[in-house]
Amino acid sequence: MSLPHAILTALLEKPSSGLELTRRFDRSIAYFWSATHQQIYRELGKLEGEGYIRALPTERPARGQKKSYEVLPAGRQELARWTSAPQDPKPWRDALFVRLRAAAVVGTTGLADDLRRHLAQHQRQLAEYEEIEERDFGPGRDTTQDRLQHLILRAGIDLETFWSQWLTDALEEFERLPESGGREAGPERE
Amino acid sequence: MSLPHAILTALLEKPSSGLELTRRFDRSIAYFWSATHQQIYRELGKLEGEGYIRALPTERPARGQKKSYEVLPAGRQELARWTSAPQDPKPWRDALFVRLRAAAVVGTTGLADDLRRHLAQHQRQLAEYEEIEERDFGPGRDTTQDRLQHLILRAGIDLETFWSQWLTDALEEFERLPESGGREAGPERE
DNA sequence: CCCCACATGTAATCCGTTACATGATTAT
DNA sequence: ATAATCATGTAACGGATTACATGTGGGG
């Protein structure tokens, strides 16, 4: 249930139309919570129905016409409630590990190439984050908001660093492995 | 589309019934791809329909009767195909970062307590992984399968280490922050 | 005039989650 | 007998993804 709250946050930062929100998500929030324009329009409808946001009355609403939203007091209150309420962390899920486990049974053919591709992507993402850090969080940026957003960015940087390191290690390990086509059966250990 | 392939992998490791699969998932695969028994039964039905697995004919199938499955050649082939095919990494999504970003707008009240809770959980998980590493991947465990599964475990350890470190840093930062109730508006930077 | 980019949506499908239902086996 | 547990499912719902539909405004 994070998307509506991500939208409320974005709208509090700056009232926007659906497409503007989509673009702003792509530029910043999508780094930790991505959403397509379809999702966003649907949520905007719901949030309006629940009385958390309202369309700015300045523009007439119509299909193809821009429609901007702002957050109502009830929306801000709901966001504050959700932010402070305890939530358990979701267990991480990653298809790459499923593939690795599968490769232990059916063979590692072709996997190394894809690991290299992933490594390149994570390195690129890491470089992008570091660029943002230099540009947006240099000296003198020290408000509470700056510090919190910097914390999020640091998490991104550390995660991409983890991936780059782990994939490098994994590739090294792969080079020492016999490129087998898998095994038929064997004892299981869990 | 990882669940069916995780199931194929588990069944290749050892033919099992639905509930046995569920238990084995909980004990090992769920660390990187969790699934409930309902999901597993649904997927078993699909996989059987697609000709990737079949019920072992030894037991008559009926509600409440154990029914074991084994992987057919087509299933092994599909698993090998999927494992070697390129796949883009999914962007990470974490509600905690949404909450942090929201807190920058509506205030950090209550968040620190929950961060401490998360920290404790991640430290517990880290300890569990390290125990598994000592127990199952000591010296002398050196087959290809061991090495690949060890790589997965190392990823888990490194990720939990990241979380523990990041949450510690974040809590430290929180202590230096004025416990504000949020701000009304302000310039946005993305 | 026509095409394309902008903007807002609808529909279908899949996956995951939660709650519930039902049959078989075992212990008391 | 009956209650608890094992085992296999069904049903309903919600979020995410993908494909498609519709309308507006501007440039060539």
Image (cartoon, coloured by chain):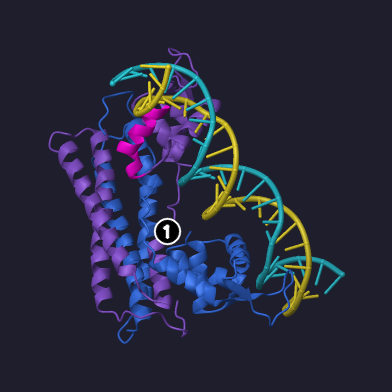
Chain colours: A blue, B purple, C cyan, D yellow
Q: Which residue does the numbered mark 1 point to in the structure image?
A: B93
Quadrant in the rendering for residue B111? bottom left
Which residue range is magenta in the image?
B18-32
Of residue B97 and residue A23, the one placed in the foreground of this image is B97
The amino acid type of the residue labelled 1 equals Arg
x%, y% of residue B141?
A: 17, 34
* Whether residue A155 is visible: yes
Is residue B41 left or right of A97 when viewed as pictured?
Answer: right
Of residue A37 and residue B34, the one placed in the foreground of this image is B34
Can you say whether B123 is above or below B63 in the image?
below
* Whether residue A28 is visible: no
Number of marks: 1
Can you say whether A143 is above or below A115 in the image?
below
Subunit ID for the residue under disc 1 = B
Q: Residue furthest left?
A: B139
Can you say whether B126 is above or below A76 in the image?
above
User: Residue at 39% across / 64% down in the picture?
Assistant: A85
Q: Is residue B23 magenta?
A: yes
Q: Residue furthest bottom?
A: A140
Quadrant in the rendering for residue B163? bottom left
Of residue D19 and residue B108, the one placed in the foreground of this image is B108
Q: Which corner quadrant holds the C terminus of chain A?
A: top left
Q: Is residue A22 magenta?
A: no
User: Residue at 27% across / 39% down in the picture?
Assistant: B149
x%, y% of residue A127?
A: 35, 68
Is residue A158 left or right of A42 when viewed as pictured?
Answer: left
User: Residue at 44% across / 20% down in the picture?
Assistant: B67
x%, y% of residue A25?
A: 51, 68
